[in-house]
Amino acid sequence: MNMKKNDMKFSDSIMAKYFVLAAIGVMAILLVVIIIMLGLQVDNDRPENPNQISSAESNFGTVGEFDLPELKIESIEEEGDQMVVSTSYCTFKYPMAYSDLISVEAYQGDGMSGIRFTAKIGGEQIPIYSLLFNSQEGGEFGTLDIEGVAESVRVSVVFAELPADIKDDDKATFFATQETVNDVERSLSEFDGYTSSN
């Protein structure tokens, strides 16, 4: 009888150890699954193109403690040898020679606005630079008075990096389209309400 009781105690002790080991195994598997799911979530949050500037643009931060009115592109027209882009904030120009290559679009988020410039290179629209309003990021151009905003708004530019997979023939086109930022900056200084920092 004592033997059986000892066997049962021994058996219960082994069973308890197995339960503890099983519980630890299940917890380890759950931990691995959670880590994998978090890794997938981080990957999904990244833009598909590493050179693409996210439309949320929240990483640019704001300068002033105020909201900007909606930035809209009102028209894009030819004028002499220039493309004239009229927005609800300002008007700027770039050479008409680039009209088939360059596209512009407005975006907004977290207290700042921007105009994204992309170029059709190698059959794809590739980001080349962004003109930012009320952002701490980028090289400063100057300040702009915007209707409905009490303070002058910082205007700056952020350049996209050369895509790693771009072909050698297209590199010159990429850098040439980025050079149009000089025309944009010059044309901004002709706009009332803009003050250049140079």
Image (cartoon, grey):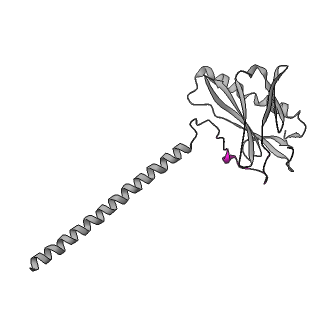
For the residue pair 12 and 194, the one nearer the viewer reads as 12
Quadrant assignment, res 1: bottom left
Which stretch appears magenta? 53-69
Quarter of the image with the C terminus is top right
Residue 179 lies in quadrant: top right
Please report the residue visible at 87 percent of the width from the left and 34 percent of the height from the top: 189
Q: Nearer the viewer, residue 2 or 176?
A: 2
Residue 178 versus residue 18 in the image, above or below: above
- Above or below — where is 152 with respect to 115? below
Residue 47 is left or right of residue 3, and the answer is right
Where residue 105 appears, x then y in whole percent? Answer: 72, 34
Residue 141: % across, % down: 80, 39
> Is 42 placed left or right of 162 in the picture?
left
Principal SS element in the magenta part?
A: loop
| Residue closest to the far right | 192
Q: Is residue 55 magenta?
A: yes
Q: Relative to residue 15, is residue 34 depicted above or below?
A: above
